[in-house]
């Protein structure tokens, strides 16, 4: 029961990748939407602030560079300010802009046609001296812009009373307010993005949960079915042996044994892949001389290689020790040899090479054979289960999972495997395995 629950809840690497992509897509989408909303909002806020400032600047220009209060309230307001607060019976027209001259700070600079400052009026500002005003006026003229920002001022270069004049309006409060809003909106956007990611993680788990359950059920079915298949296969083999004892040898019995062997091999590979997917594939790792193992497996397949008429070229060091399970690595080499025999071309010799640099922590084994119907480049599809390049493959062919098992074996050793066609006429399968490290931490390499 414990193993069943573990298998049911464990995520395969592709499911984990799917869940991560779900979170990334949700985060990217949220980031895009939040960025657009923040950009539009802050641009609109900036334009609104700028338009409001320009309206006041235009009012200053319209009044000849000097803001004045409305005639109906100017005198009484001036008296009220001088004497104290407004009397209770005094009423001011709310539509009259009488507060404007007392709520803004501005100055004007008179310019000649060459852009030189010839005069300045700083009566309505305290923080700017006459010299500073003249310098700002010349900067505004040099920019050749009708409107703009300099320091904390919004300016307009225009004509006032027939003279070229730069009108500067203090925008310190408005600009500070804008940047405060910008920082607040940016903080809210970041918090919103974090909230979306925080919600996307558990939602992604729930979204892929049915896939995890389905995949676990498929693995259990494959394991159980593979075990169940082997029982009738054993009965069939026993029956064939009995028939052979009673009636003698027959090509039909040989065909039965051959097909039973294929089915048994398929069942074994399916069980291996299922256990590997469940993470239950445990192997005793020790020192394995890969060079010695290559010679052993080639000798084991010598009859088949000779029957195929294949010439083998070896480029092997004296030895190359790797950290692995000898039985599984032997299975790996058998699978690669079998794949080359089934799908390779005997017109060119095989090349089996091992590279074990002393300074490297990995050993590379590669096998190259001639092959048809390939395009130059990587061929990761060859490691897919039940992949068949030739849909019309005869019953003598493989099952299409040999290289999938090879990849599982390499992954269990924390190695890498790659199938490449360098020229479109050959296939090179390269395997990287961890080198064996001595007690002092040094690898044996190819010494």
Image: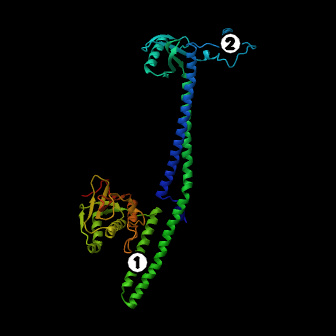
Task: Please provide percent x and percent y for residue 75.
Answer: 67, 9
Disc 1 is placed on an element classified as helix
Give residue 207's position: percent from left, percent from top: 56, 55
Q: Foreground residue, 389 or 278?
A: 389
Residue drawn at point x = 46 percent, y = 22 percent: 145
Q: Is residue 262 left or right of residue 129?
A: left
Determine whether, in the image, residue 309 is placed left or right of residue 126. Answer: left
Labelled disc at residue 259: 1
Say if 124 sits above or below 302 in the image: above
Q: Quadrant of the N terminus?
A: bottom right
Q: Quadrant of the C terminus?
A: bottom left
- Going 51% across and 67% down the picture, which residue do you hit? 220
Residue that badge 2 annotates:
73
For the point 40% across and 85% down, the residue is: 241
Q: Residue lying farthest right?
A: 89
154 and 130: which one is in front? Answer: 154
Counting from the top left corner in percent of width and height, residue 26 is at 53, 47
> Does residue 361 sit above or below 38 in this rendering?
below
Q: Picture coordinates of residue 306 (x, y %)?
A: 26, 73
Q: CA distance from mark 1 to mark 2?
A: 110 Å
């Amino acid at each position: 029961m414990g193993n069943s629950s573990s298998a049911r809840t464990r995520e395969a690497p592709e499911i984990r990748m799917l869940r991560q992509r779900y979170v990334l897509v949700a985060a990217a989408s949220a980031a895009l939407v939040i960025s657009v909303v923040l950009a539009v909002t802050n641009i609109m806020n900036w334009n609104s602030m700028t338009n409001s400032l320009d309206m006041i600047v235009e009012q200053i220009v319209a009044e000849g560079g000097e803001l004045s209060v409305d005639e109906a309230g100017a005198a009484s307001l001036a008296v009220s300010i001088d004497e104290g607060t407004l009397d209770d019976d005094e009423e001011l027209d709310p539509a009259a802009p009488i507060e404007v001259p007392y709520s803004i700070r501005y100055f004007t600079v008179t310019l000649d046609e060459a852009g030189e400052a010839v005069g300045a009026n700083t009566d309505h500002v305290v923080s700017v001296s006459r010299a500073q005003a003249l310098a700002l006026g010349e900067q505004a003229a040099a920019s050749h812009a009708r409107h703009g920002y300099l320091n904390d001022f919004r300016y307009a270069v225009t004509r006032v009373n027939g003279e070229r004049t730069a009108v500067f309006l203090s925008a310190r409060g408005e600009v500070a307010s804008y940047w405060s809003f910008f920082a607040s909106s940016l903080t809210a956007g970041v918090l919103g993005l974090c909230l979306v990611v925080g919600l996307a993680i558990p939602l992604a788990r729930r979204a892929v949960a049915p896939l995890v359950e389905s995949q676990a059920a498929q693995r259990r079915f494959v394991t159980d079915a593979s075990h169940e298949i082997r029982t009738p296969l054993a009965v069939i083999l026993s029956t064939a042996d009995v028939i052979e004892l009673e009636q003698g040898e027959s090509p039909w019995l040989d065909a039965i044994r051959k097909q039973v062997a294929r089915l048994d091999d398929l069942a074994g590979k399916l069980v291996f892949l299922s256990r590997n997917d469940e993470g239950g594939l445990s192997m005793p790792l020790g020192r394995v001389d890969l060079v010695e193992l290559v010679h052993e497996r080639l000798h084991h397949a010598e009859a088949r290689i000779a029957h195929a008429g294949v010439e083998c070229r070896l480029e092997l060091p004296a030895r190359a020790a790797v950290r692995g399970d000898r039985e599984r690595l032997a299975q790996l080499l058998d699978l690669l040899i079998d794949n080359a025999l089934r799908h390779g071309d005997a017109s060119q010799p095989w090349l089996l090479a091992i590279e074990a640099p002393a300074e490297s922590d990995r050993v590379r084994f590669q096998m190259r054979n001639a092959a048809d119907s390939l395009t130059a480049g990587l061929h990761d599809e060859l490691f897919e289960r039940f992949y068949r390049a030739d849909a019309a493959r005869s019953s003598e062919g493989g099952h299409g999972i040999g290289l999938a098992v090879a990849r599982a074996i390499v992954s269990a050793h924390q190695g890498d495997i790659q199938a490449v066609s360098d020229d479109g006429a050959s296939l090179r399968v390269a395997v990287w395995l961890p080198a064996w490290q001595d007690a002092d931490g040094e690898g044996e390499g190819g010494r």
